[in-house]
C-alpha cells in the first residue's frame, strides 16, 4: 500500500500505537504529522520515521487543552497544504469509582483527552478531509463494549461514547465521500499502564485473553494502513476488534 502524496495526522504519536502508526505510514511514503506532549519521545519517533521515509512534522501539544488542540490541524495544513487521514489515537486513564467518590473527577480527566479532544480535532479537520475525500480512524478499545474492570469505568464510558461518535460522523460525512472507522484493541503492550495510576499488571491482561498474549503496536498500525487505503474504500462506520480473543471470555 502506497501513501505517497498523502498527509496523515496522528495524535498520541510519541509512543505505542501512535508511534508505530507514524513509522508505518512514513515507510509507505506519507507525509506524517505526529502530536504528543513529550518532545524527547517525539524526536525519537521522528528519527525512526526518517530512517524509512520522510521526517514527520512534530507538534508538541496537550490535546486535553482546547487552545493547544486547536493548533494541531492548523499547523498540519500550514505545513502540508492538506489532510488525507486523521488518526485520533491519543488516550489515557485515571482510576475512579462510584463509591470512592472520585468517578466524576476521573471521567472529566479521561474524557478531556479520550473524547472531547477527538470531537474538537475532528470538527476542525472535517472540512479539509472533505476536500481530499479522506478518512478518519478513531482508536477506541474493547472497553467500549464490555463491562469495565475495576478502575476503568471512566475510560470505558469514554470509549463507548467514542464508538457512537464515530458511527454518527461516518453517517454524516458519507455523502461527502469521507469515511470514519473504529479500531478497538484489547491489551496492547504500550506505556498506558505505566502512565496510569491503576495498579493492574500486564500479566492480568495477558491471562484474560483467549490466546494468552498481548497485542503489539505494529499489529494495530498495519490495520490502520488497510483502513486508510483504497482497499477499504467501501468500509465506513465499522469497528475492527483486535484483542487476542479477550471478548470471547468476557
Image (cartoon, rainbow, N blue to C red):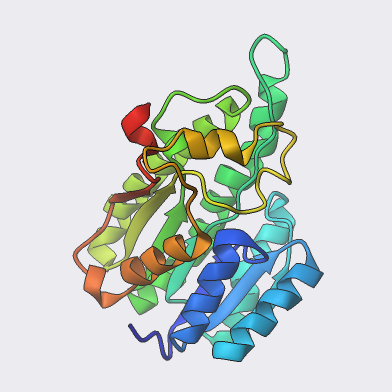
The residue drawn where x is 65% and y is 18% is 97
Q: Nearer the viewer, residue 139 or 243?
A: 243
**Residue 21, above or below 3:** above
The residue drawn where x is 64% and y is 81% is 48
Image coordinates for residue 129, horizontal then vertical, percent: 41, 71
The residue drawn where x is 80% and y is 71% is 40
Picture quadrant where residue 128 is located: bottom left
Picture quadrant where residue 73 is located: bottom right
Q: Is residue 1 left or right of residue 144?
A: left
Picture quadrant where residue 55 is located: bottom right
Residue at far left of view: 234
The residue drawn where x is 44% and y is 68% is 127
Image coordinates for residue 57, horizontal then vertical, percent: 65, 81
Q: Nearer the viewer, residue 11 or 46?
A: 46
Instruction: Examine the rendering and report whether any part of residue 82 can be seen.
Output: no
Q: Quadrant of the N terminus?
A: bottom left
Amino acid at each position: 500500500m502506497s501513501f505517497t502524496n498523502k498527509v496523515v495526522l496522528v495524535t498520541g504519536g510519541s509512543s505505542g500505537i501512535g508511534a508505530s502508526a507514524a513509522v508505518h505510514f512514513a515507510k509507505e511514503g506519507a507525509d506524517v504529522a505526529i502530536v504528543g506532549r513529550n518532545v524527547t519521545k517525539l524526536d525519537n519517533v521522528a528519527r525512526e520515521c526518517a530512517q524509512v521515509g520522510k521526517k514527520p512534522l512534530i507538534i508538541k501539544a496537550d490535546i486535553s487543552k482546547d487552545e493547544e488542540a486547536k493548533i494541531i490541524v492548523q499547523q498540519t495544513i500550514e505545513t502540508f497544504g492538506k489532510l488525507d487521514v486523521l488518526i485520533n489515537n491519543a488516550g489515557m486513564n485515571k482510576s475512579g469509582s462510584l463509591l470512592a467518590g472520585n468517578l466524576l473527577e476521573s471521567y472529566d480527566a479521561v474524557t478531556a483527552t479520550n473524547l472531547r479532544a477527538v470531537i474538537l480535532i475532528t470538527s476542525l479537520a472535517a472540512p479539509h478531509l472533505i476536500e481530499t475525500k479522506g478518512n478518519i480512524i478513531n482508536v477506541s478499545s474493547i472497553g467500549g463494549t464490555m463491562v469495565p474492570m475495576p478502575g476503568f469505568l471512566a475510560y470505558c464510558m469514554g470509549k463507548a461514547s467514542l464508538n457512537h461518535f464515530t458511527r454518527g460522523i461516518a453517517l454524516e460525512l458519507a455523502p461527502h465521500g469521507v469515511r470514519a472507522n473504529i479500531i478497538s484493541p484489547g491489551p496492547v503492550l504500550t506505556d498506558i499502564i505505566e502512565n496510569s495510576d491503576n495498579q493492574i499488571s500486564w500479566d492480568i491482561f495477558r491471562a484474560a485473553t483467549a490466546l494468552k498474549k498481548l497485542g503489539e503496536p505494529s499489529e494495530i498500525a498495519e490495520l490502520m494502513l488497510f483502513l486508510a487505503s483504497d482497499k477499504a474504500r467501501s468500509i465506513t462506520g465499522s469497528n475492527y476488534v483486535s484483542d487476542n480473543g479477550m471478548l470471547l471470555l468476557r
